[in-house]
Image: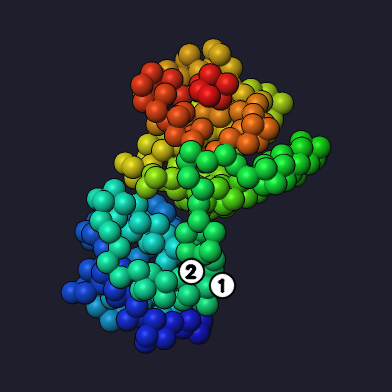
Amino acid sequence: MKMNPLSSLDYDLLDYVFEMGGGYVLDFSNRTFSEFFVDELSIDIDNSRYCDNGTSKAKRLRSYLRQSGKEDALRVLSALWEYREVKRKRAGVKEEKPEYVAEFWQFIEKLGGKPPKSQTKREPASQDEKMDDRLANELLAKLMEVSNLDPQPRGYAFEKFLKELFDSCGLYGRASFRLVGEQIDGSFEMNGETYLLEAKWTNQQVDASDLRSFNAKVEDKASWSRGLFISNSGFTEDGLLAFGTGKSLICMDGLDLSEILLGKLSFQSVLSKKARRAAETGRPFVRVRDLV
């Protein structure tokens, strides 16, 4: 049996952070709570093994954590935190007790996790700021290293590079994760919006079928999700035309990435402008050079 990684004081902290008084967990209903655990974590939280001390949402969550190891507990708590923060920021609610948040991230570190950039000394750069010269040069060099790899390891290295880019810009990147029946190459958060990532480094440009496939994944998730499709080789004109307008995706190619790093541009600013242009025109792909 796995040793319970949480103490009674840890559970008291989680009761506050995830609003678990009265058997609740955040704003979940029974249905959305179950769906969240299945869709985001591939966990059947309704399983009878988690109802050993009661069937409320809070009691099932506590039971799961009590029966889990550190790695599984960390994965669940991180996903719940991401949900909590998106909801809080969308509602414009100020954090009432930031000292509890700091304590929560100390607890996450105890489990082996890492706090987001906003909880460390380094704060995310403003969207209007230029990227630091040293950081931009380091990232550009790493992007060139990826381009010199053989095809098989290159895809994984590209995903790793993008996570480092997101983390460096204060976007709280999450590495590749697998849901039931599908693979997502990562995710990050910007301005309270969660972006799912599709990353491709192939010799062929992406066509409409790949765009439609990823768009379906995004639209099948929470209503606030967006998708960022990064294709190093770009997108076919016919594919973009066939894919159409008014979708949930924003597209970026390898030349966009190079121009961001060479120009020391703020990644947040570029993505924000792409999102605005997509909202205004319905077009998922507008090149960086046409935005700045």
Which amino acid lies under the numbered mark 1 shown in the image of this protein? Answer: Gly
Q: Nearer the viewer, residue 167 or 29?
A: 167
How many callouts does the rendering have?
2
Please, what secondary structure does the residue beneath circle 2 have?
helix
In percent of the image, x 51 and y 23: which residue is there? 291
Q: Would you say residue 270 is visible in this rendering?
A: yes
What residue sits 67% from the left and 47% below the top? 135
Q: Residues within 10 Å of mark 1 (few under 14, many from 20)?
A: few
Furthest residue in direction bottom, as rendered:
8
Q: Residue furthest left?
A: 22
Q: Residue at x 50, y 84 (%)?
A: 3
User: Residue 86 vs residue 20: left or right?
Assistant: right
Q: Residue at x 46, y 24 (%)?
A: 284
Question: 206 or 179, which is in the foreground?
Answer: 206
Three-letter amino acid code at the position of disc 2:
Leu
Horizontal side of residue 191 vs 238, given as left or right: left
Picture quadrant where residue 158 is located: top right
Up the image or down, 21 lies above or below 264; here it is below
Which is more N-terminal, label 1 or label 2? 2
> In this figure, which residue is indicated by the disc labeled 2?
74
- Could you say where residue 169 lies in the image, as x and y percent from the top left? 55, 48
Task: Name the residue beneath numbered marker 1.
Answer: 112
In whole angstroms, how far apart are the C-alphas of marks 2 and 1? 8 Å
